[in-house]
Image: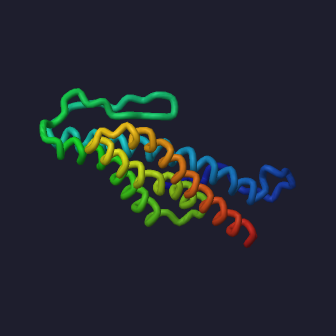
Amino acid sequence: MALRRIRPHTKSKFWLNHPKVASIYDFLVCLLVYYALFTLVHESVHLFVLKSLGGEGSISWTSGMAYTLPTALPAAPWAIILIALSGGIGAFLFGLLMLSREDEKEERMGILPNMVAELPYGILEGIYFATGSTAIYFWMPIVFQAAWIIGLMYAVVRMIMYWRKW
C-alpha cells in the first residue's frame, strides 16, 4: 500500500516542502487512514465470523466509529465469544501482515498504534461477551485508547529518531 506518494518532496525553500515536514504530514495521514482501515477490518472480521457460524448481521457506521449489528446470533455461547474475540485478533493479524509488507517508515509507524490497540481491545471484547461484566464494558474503550497512545508514543519517538538522521 503506497500512501507515501501523497506529496512530492521538492528542493523549494518553502517550509511545507521540507522533507521532514512532508514526512510528518505523511505520518499523520497514514495514522488516520490506517485507523479507518483497521476499524473496517475489525468489524468485517466480526461479520465474517458471525456469518460463518450461521448468524446474520450488518456493519453500521457512525462518526469515527463502526459496529457490527447482529440480527441473528448462533445459539451456542462459545460462538458468541468467538465472534467477539475475532474482530480484535483479526485486525491485529492484519496489522502484522501490513507491517511485514511495508517498507516506508511513516506507514509502518502509522500502522503500529492501530495494530497495538486492537489486541487488548479484542481480548476484552471477548471477556465482556463471555461474562457480561459491565466493568469490562467500561474498561474496553479506556484500554483501547491507552494502548493506542502507547503505540503512538513509540511511533513518534521512532519517527523523531528517523528524522534526526537527516
Q: How is the image coloured?
A: rainbow
Instruction: Please state the horizontal and vertical placement of residue 152, each as a whole percent of the image.
Output: 59, 55
> Is 103 in front, or is 61?
61
- Residue 113 in sight from this viewpoint: yes
Residue 24 in picture, x, y percent from top left: 69, 54
| Rendered view: 26 above or below 157 | above
Q: Is residue 82 left or right of residue 122?
A: left
Q: Up-down: is 152 above or below 165?
A: above
* Observer-nearest of 61 and 105: 61
Q: How many marks?
A: 0
Q: Is residue 141 left or right of residue 22?
A: left
Residue at 87 percent across and 55 percent down: it is 13
**Residue nearest the viewer, comparing 127 with 84:** 127
Q: Quadrant of the C terminus?
A: bottom right
Which picture quadrant has residue 106?
bottom right
Is residue 144 shown left or right of residue 26?
A: left
Could you tell me which residue is drawn at 45 percent across and 45 percent down?
37
Farthest right residue in view: 13
Q: Residue at x 50, y 44 (%)?
A: 142
**Vertical position of residue 117 compared to residue 58: above or below:** below
Q: Residue 57, relative to residue 118: is it above or below?
A: above
Percent position (x, y) of residue 29? 61, 47
Q: Position of residue 125 (x, y in %)?
A: 35, 45
Which residue shows up at 48% across the image and 47% down it?
A: 144
